[in-house]
Image (tube, rainbow, N blue to C red):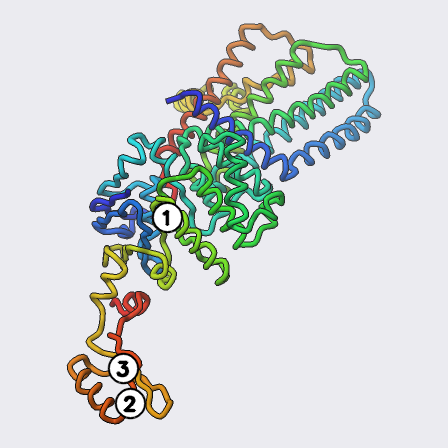
Amino acid sequence: MLNRKVFTKIGTVAYYTSREIIKSKVLVNTVLIGIGLLIVTYIAMSFTYGEPSRVALDFGLGMLTISSVSIAVFMGVSLLSDEMKNRTVYIIISRPVPRFAFVFGKIIGLALILLINILILSTITLSLYFYIGGNFEPLINWTILYITLESLIMLVLVCLFSLITSKVLSVILSIVIYIIGHSIDGVKLLTLVQTNPTLESILDIYHYILPGFYKLNLKQHLLYKQDIAFEYLLSTSIYGIGYCLALVFLTAWIFEKKNLD
Amino acid sequence: MLEFNKITKKFNSDLFTQSFVALEDVSFKVEPGKIVGFLGANGAGKTTSLKIAMDFIRPTSGTVTFDKNLGTRNIDIFNNIGFLPERPFFYPHLKGREFCHFMGKLSDLTKNEINEKISFWAPRFKIDFALDREINTYSKGMLQRVGFLVTLIHSPKFIILDEPLSGLDPIGRKELKDIIVEVNKLGKTVFFSSHIVSDVEEVCDNVIFLKDGKLYYEGSVDKIIEDNIRPIANICFRKNGIFEIIKISNELKNQKIKELLNNNCEIVSVNSDKPTLEEIIYNVK
């Protein structure tokens, strides 16, 4: 099923997808966010005593998360659905291109844009952080890696929803899952949940199905210099990558079975 | 080249409404080497049939088979098919040339092969002047031309076109019809849907006609016209330098000609009253 030709086709679809997005000037937003980040950080630093570099890092990583997740959700929702709506999908899959290769290519194409966005904004953030006097910490790399994983999961999640429901509902569902995914560990600590075994079981089931984004949030640990075991970082990375791949395969499977009418 | 065998397609909008039958027990064959027109009013099931042929949607029942010359695996079959969808819409920010390279690469062509094909076809489609512009600056006709170009870029053996002539001006239609005839002369089979009957009559050898999701006619254009010839003769004659045409039933034709000759009229021509394909199609109830 997967031979060299198929990989070439995935690469071709990915290349032209990212080229089309770059030409649509989406990355201008990234540059604007970058400039905004510099201005906001400069202003925030003026009101801060003691740890201005931490403020710069906090703002930078926050902006990085918001912009990456926004690009993933708002561009991801159109990635496959617009192909079907505009019938561009017909002209591509009427070629010797397996449907799954088309899905992989489209997702990789947008993922490349996400990576460029993350690269630009993290370069600005870290440059500012080191310029102000911040010290290098290995957890910075892990935090950026996890933001990348989080936005990739959101990208594939919204693509998957867009195949089975409308664009508006896909965006709403994805954002709801994002919020729940970040707050679920806090919710589990509530007395209401801990005293209610049924509710606790429901939340446990959630863990097996929907993404636990809270696991990928290292910002607090980084800002308060908390140590994290390497085993945790490794297992969470495997979880994030595995979850993302599972979603990609599920999306490709749904697209494979879907009537493109 | 393509065979539909008892294809039925039903669409279910939701659980509570009755399913809509778009195609019912439709069987037909597209013979190799021919230009075959696919006729039917809007909603007759032409586009649904083409989507089923291209595996975009699956039939409720029935099978679609392709000629073994196209290949046995789906991937080989699709490498030998050129498909142009109805009202094509391409990536707006790509240039026409980039889009041609995109499609060529998906059909396993090398960069040089793609450039050769572009040099060959772009002037014929009169789109070469616009290939270095972004597609969002193209008119509807230009989109159709670039769509046609990428349909032919990988030299397919079988070309399927969904309403290829819609949205084009009369000159554009004539040019594309000439290209359809030209690619057919190169040995390629062309199957195209249209609701412009005169275009189909002009270029097609065979015609498949759908009505309300059912096959109404399959066969040669000449045969359907012959079968519908009315028993009326058109006699064109000249009297005192003035041309006149009269319509008369076939039984009275000879008697009328004698009368005209006796009245010193010159018979210019006598033709049976052949309907056009358009008239036949419009008269289908």
Number of numbered discs visible in the structure rendering: 3
Q: Residue at x 48, y 33 (%)?
A: A159
User: What residue sits right under mark 2 in the picture?
Assistant: B265
Residue A92, quarter of picture: top left
Q: Secondary structure at mark 3?
A: strand
Q: Quadrant of the C terminus of chain A?
A: top left
Image location (x, y in percent) of residue A161: 45, 35
Q: Nearer the viewer, mark 2 or mark 3?
A: 2
Q: Secondary structure at mark 1?
A: helix
Q: Does label 2 or label 3 sit earlier along the sequence?
A: 3
Q: Amino acid at mark 2?
A: Cys
Q: For mark 1, does the 10 Å Cα neighbourhood hold few (<14), some (14 to 19), or many (20 or more) residues?
A: some
Residue A132 located left or right of residue B201:
right
Residue B198, quarter of picture: bottom left
Q: Nearer the viewer, mark 2 or mark 1?
A: 2
Q: Amino acid at mark 3?
A: Ile
Q: Which mark is residue B235?
A: 3
Chain of residue at mark 2: B
Q: Does label 2 or label 1 sit earlier along the sequence?
A: 1
Q: Quadrant of the N terminus of chain A?
A: top left
Q: For mark 3, does the 10 Å Cα neighbourhood hold few (<14), some (14 to 19), or many (20 or more) residues?
A: many
- View extreme (left): residue: B251
User: What residue sits right under mark 1 in the picture?
Assistant: B184
In the rendered image, the vertical position of residue A32 relative to residue B203, given as above or below? above
In the rendered image, the vertical position of residue A200 relative to residue B232, given as above or below? above
Q: Measure the alpha-carbon separation of dots 2 and 3.
A: 11 Å
Chain of residue at mark 1: B
Residue B198 located left or right of residue A14:
left
Q: Does label 1 or label 3 sit earlier along the sequence?
A: 1
Q: For mark 2, does the 10 Å Cα neighbourhood hold few (<14), some (14 to 19), or many (20 or more) residues?
A: some
Residues marked 2 and 1, same chain = yes
Q: Measure the alpha-carbon separation of dots 1 and 3.
A: 37 Å
